[in-house]
Image (cartoon, rainbow, N blue to C red):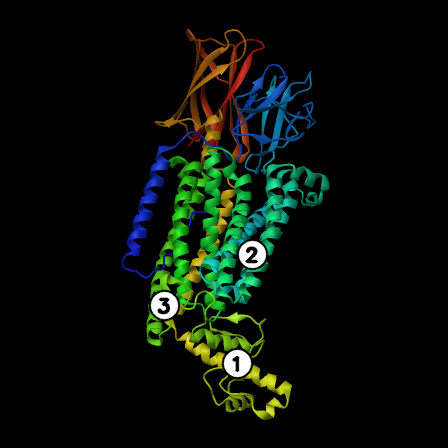
């Protein structure tokens, strides 16, 4: 995920220029890479050829059907099926590999003595990047015929199972970001946050989400890559087969690493949060940082092992780049989520913690930009793929979202600068501030809290540790006490008189009369905390810098959620390079249209003696309605006379055709047809059948745009 983040720092006049210059250089490099291109890369296997070809008419039944793919695939016994016109299996069984050091090819043998007619080839496999791929085409023996087989319209990995798998994939990314990024925020930016319940919940929920999503993906792998039936998720034989695959091994490895991560989280929010000795806490910080980094790299590696990075162009470079990219995303987005929770749900996050996150975020931006540029070049590689493929268009949407985050981040940085300046001014007046180098306040990471923090600690002591923190008001809620309703009541008046309207929690004791009644004392203590919360809320709401920062960070987080969704779709989309490679390998390429005509030049080979030649065809005016067709057949030595030529037009998107056309022989090698009716404009498939002898003929398909 290519993403950027604000850089909050103490030098607002210099940082924006540096960041903008760096971003401009990186964008220039991206444009250069895209324009330069490279050798084809593969991810999401694509069918690049077949024998017989799609739509071909062969004189005699072939011994086998062979398919050529853009990358290595995993096949099963039913990965390639050949069905006769009645829908019965015409192949003899499991496919066999025919690669032999060349392009990736798989073939399936056919029964002998197959009758004439139209045969359907349906195939489904799993590409090397773990995504299922499928397709179907037809060929005919002798002559085309009616068939009871309907070509499948749904691709593998679709339907309800595909939707659930996509949701689980998104949840897995989100869970990892919260788990890794939230932990990094605590260790690198705000160590006292380890003791805050809202941050603890954020990280633990990230762990739970990632674990649950991984289990769901593991169970759904069988129907996702096979039948598409949700009930097959509980097929134990299918699960065993999944465990033997690379994606299955990656998911199991992720679960094992998550088991170790549970111990990491327990230490971070247990022993680490309670540690008081400064030296011991520093040692534990180092150990948690190293251990957490190893676990995060391992979990991120499970994606790189089984996704786009593991196949195609430069996998040895792409996989570590992919790991670095995902870790940078987690550090930025997860840290942003933790900052948002801290700003809204904890009462005393310091300006120094926000500033330290700014530095982490800016470092993540640099890593994201560099790795994102490489990934974009690797998966797209050309301007045509960037604008003409679904993958490239999604990438442009992603870039637009990043630009939106940059704009909001600029405002966040301004609010942070004001917050930091205000904190530094307050510290200079009170004589207490942060230690050198932007570290924790004086006294070290475990040093004494400042005045605001001590007041907040006193407030926390008066409330249950299990109640949620509402940092939008800067206080803890009171377990269901309605502060607004409480104001003005007799009980509130009694409490106010009891505490003497003290501004600092704990400044007055509960009256002796209430002390003799423990239940009444507890009630008065809760009400006193509610009144204190009301006073603190007024103070917090008056802090315009903090409120402005909260709003801008909230907008950033909202855009980041959409950005993560687009990124998840990208991981399940055929890369632009592969799509263009498949189009180039397909014999049915779109014909050029010039001057109101379609002009084609199609080589053919019927397989018999003197069976090679070229068909030249002109269609005019190449629009809906009446058209004229002129067709010339050239052999190696000039015009070539053949016994028969036939044409057929099919508009597959509207289920029109094939519309047969039998041209008249005008002269040796020259055929013509007048008043050829094309009912509507569209992308038509033109099939040209050439017969050079009684038994030798072939059909060439070409897509032409008419109208």
Viewer-side label of 3, 1? 3
- Judged from this view, the residue extending furthest toward the front is 279
* Camera-side residue of 700 and 237: 237
Give the quadrant of residue 463: bottom right
Q: Say above or below: 505 vs 472.
A: below
Q: Measure the alpha-carbon separation of dots 3 and 1.
A: 27 Å
> Which circle marks residue 206 in the picture?
2
The secondary structure type at the circle numbered 3 is helix
Image quadrant occupied by the C terminus: top left
Quadrant of res 249: top right
**Residue drawn at (45%, 41%) of the image:** 321
Decide if residue 681 is in sight here. no
- x, y (%) of residue 124? 61, 33
Give residue 201's position: percent from left, percent from top. Answer: 56, 63
Q: Which mark is residue 419?
A: 3
Q: Distance between the residues labelled 2 and 1?
A: 32 Å
Task: Residue 534: give x, y in percent of width and height.
Answer: 48, 80
Between the residue at mark 3 and the residue at mark 2, the CA separation in whole angstroms equals 29 Å
| Mark 3 vs 1, N-terminal side | 3
Q: Along the horizontal axis of the image, is 123 left or right of 439?
A: right
Q: Which residue is drawn at 53% across and 19% down?
A: 699
């Amino acid at each position: 995920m290519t993403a950027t983040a604000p850089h909050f720092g103490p030098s607002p006049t210099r940082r924006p220029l540096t960041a903008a210059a760096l971003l401009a250089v990186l964008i220039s490099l991206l444009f250069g890479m895209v324009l330069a291109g490279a050798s084809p890369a593969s991810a999401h296997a694509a069918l690049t050829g077949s024998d017989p070809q799609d739509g071909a008419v062969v004189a005699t039944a072939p011994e086998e059907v062979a398919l050529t793919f853009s990358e290595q695939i995993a096949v099963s016994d039913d990965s390639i099926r050949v069905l006769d016109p009645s829908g019965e299996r015409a192949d003899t069984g499991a496919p066999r590999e025919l690669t032999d050091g060349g392009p990736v090819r798989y073939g399936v043998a056919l029964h002998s003595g197959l009758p004439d007619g139209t045969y359907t080839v349906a195939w489904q496999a799993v590409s090397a990047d773990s995504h299922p791929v499928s397709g179907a085409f037809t060929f005919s023996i002798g002559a085309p015929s009616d068939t009871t087989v309907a070509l499948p319209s749904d691709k593998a990995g679709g339907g309800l199972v595909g939707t659930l798998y996509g949701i689980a994939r998104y949840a897995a990314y989100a869970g990892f970001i919260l788990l890794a990024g939230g932990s990094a925020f605590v260790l690198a930016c705000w160590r006292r946050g380890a003791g805050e319940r809202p941050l603890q919940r954020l990280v633990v929920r990230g762990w739970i989400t990632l674990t649950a999503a991984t289990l769901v993906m593991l169970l759904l792998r069988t129907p996702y890559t096979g039948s598409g039936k949700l009930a097959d998720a509980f097929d134990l034989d299918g699960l065993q087969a999944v465990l033997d695959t690379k994606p299955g091994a990656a998911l199991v490895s992720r679960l094992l690493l998550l088991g170790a991560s549970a111990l990491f989280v327990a230490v971070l929010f247990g022993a680490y949060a309670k540690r008081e000795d400064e030296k011991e806490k520093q040692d534990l910080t180092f150990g948690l940082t190293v251990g957490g980094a190893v676990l995060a790299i391992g979990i991120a590696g499970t994606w790189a092992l089984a996704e786009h990075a593991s196949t195609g162009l430069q996998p040895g470079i792409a996989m570590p780049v992919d790991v670095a990219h995902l870790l940078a995303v987690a550090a930025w987005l997860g840290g942003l989520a933790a900052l948002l929770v801290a700003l809204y749900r904890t009462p005393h996050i310091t300006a120094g913690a926000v500033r330290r996150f700014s530095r982490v975020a800016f470092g993540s931006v640099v890593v994201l930009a560099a790795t994102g540029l490489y990934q974009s070049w690797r998966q797209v590689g050309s301007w045509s793929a960037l604008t003409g493929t679904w993958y490239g268009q999604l990438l442009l949407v992603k870039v637009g979202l990043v630009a939106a985050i940059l704009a909001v981040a600029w405002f966040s940085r301004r609010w942070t600068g004001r917050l930091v300046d205000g904190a530094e001014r307050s510290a200079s007046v009170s004589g207490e501030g942060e230690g050198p180098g932007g570290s924790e306040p004086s006294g070290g990471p475990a040093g004494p809290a400042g005045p605001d923090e001590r007041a907040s600690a006193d407030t926390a002591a008066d409330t249950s540790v299990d109640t949620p923190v509402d940092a939008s008001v800067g206080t803890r809620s009171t377990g269901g006490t309605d502060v607004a309703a409480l104001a003005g009541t007799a009980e509130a008046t009694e409490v106010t008189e009891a505490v003497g309207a003290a501004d600092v929690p704990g400044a007055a004791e509960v009256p002796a009369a209430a002390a003799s009644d423990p239940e009444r004392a507890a009630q008065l203590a809760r009400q006193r905390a509610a009144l204190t919360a009301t006073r603190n809320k007024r103070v917090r709401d008056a802090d315009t810098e903090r409120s402005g920062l909260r709003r801008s960070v909230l907008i950033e987080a909202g855009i980041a959620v959409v950005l993560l969704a687009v990124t998840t779709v990208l991981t399940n989309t055929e890369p632009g390079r592969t799509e263009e490679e498949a189009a180039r390998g397909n014999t049915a390429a779109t014909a050029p249209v010039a001057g109101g005509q379609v002009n084609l030049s199609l080589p053919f080979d019927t397989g018999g003696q003197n069976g090679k030649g070229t068909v030249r065809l002109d269609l005019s005016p190449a629009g809906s309605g009446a058209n004229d067709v002129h067709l010339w057949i050239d052999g190696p030595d000039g015009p070539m006379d053949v016994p028969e030529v036939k044409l057929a037009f099919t508009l597959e998107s509207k289920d029109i055709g094939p519309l047969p056309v039998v041209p008249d022989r005008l002269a040796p090698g020259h055929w013509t047809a007048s008043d050829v009716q094309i009912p509507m404009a569209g992308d038509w498939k033109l099939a040209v059948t050439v017969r050079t002898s009684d038994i030798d003929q072939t059909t060439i398909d070409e897509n032409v745009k008419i109208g």
